[in-house]
């Protein structure tokens, strides 16, 4: 049994199909990368795994289907996207730098 199995996943924005029958399997401990051009569907693919888009197909984590689960429940299962945490961290760092610069230059 694979750790994560995605079988014929299609994702939709309204009636528009953004992904068409994507399949993927990931073994325990395996590291993968999702690579593609802008607009290829990388973010939509990850959003679909997280339950953020309307989907068809099946997503199984350790043999249990995630389809129909809410995003918080999927996160509780141990699935989350680290990219959003990195973006929040970077935004926090940028804001800190801007505030420090503002303090330095506003003292003059």
Image (cartoon, helix red, strand yellow):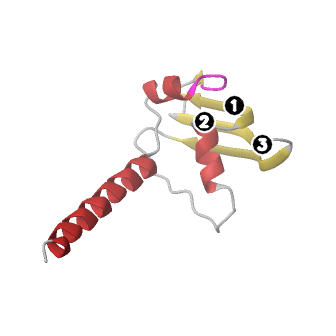
Q: Nearer the viewer, mark 1 or mark 3?
A: 3
Q: Kindly identify the residue that appears in the image at 57 percent across and 62 percent down.
A: 35
In this rendering, the count of numbered labels is 3
Quarter-wise, where is residue 28 in the image?
Answer: top left
Looking at the image, which residue sits at the far front? 108
Q: Kindly identify the residue that appears in the image at 63 percent across and 45 percent down.
A: 24
Of callouts 1 and 3, the N-terminal one: 3
Of callouts 2 and 3, the N-terminal one: 2
Q: Is residue 95 left or right of residue 55?
A: left
Q: Quadrant of the C terminus?
A: bottom left
Q: Kindly identify the residue that appears in the image at 69 percent across and 61 percent down.
A: 40
Is there CB contact under 8 Å for labels 2 and 1? yes
Residue ID for mark 1? 58
Of callouts 2 and 1, the N-terminal one: 2
Identify the element where label 3 is drawn: strand
In the rendered structure, which segment of residues is drawn in magenta? 66-70
Q: Is residue 67 magenta?
A: yes
Q: Is residue 94 left or right of residue 18?
A: left
Residue ID for mark 3? 12
Q: Nearer the viewer, residue 60 or 30?
A: 60
CA separation in Å, label 2 and label 1: 8 Å
CA neighbours of label 1 inside 10 A, class few (<14), some (14 to 19), many (20+): some
Q: Nearer the viewer, residue 53 or 102?
A: 102
CA separation in Å, label 2 and label 3: 20 Å
């Amino acid at each position: 049994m694979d750790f994560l199995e995605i079988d014929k996943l299609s994702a939709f924005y309204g009636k528009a199909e953004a992904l068409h029958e994507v399949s993927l399997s990931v073994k325990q401990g395996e590291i993968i990368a999702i690579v593609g051009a802008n607009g290829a569907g990388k973010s939509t693919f990850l959003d679909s795994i997280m339950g953020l888009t309307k989907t068809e197909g099946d997503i199984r984590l350790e043999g249990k289907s995630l389809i129909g689960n809410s995003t918080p429940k999927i996160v509780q299962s141990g699935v989350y996207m680290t990219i959003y945490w990195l973006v929040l961290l970077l935004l926090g760092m940028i804001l800190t730098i801007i505030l420090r610069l503002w303090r330095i230059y506003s003292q003059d």
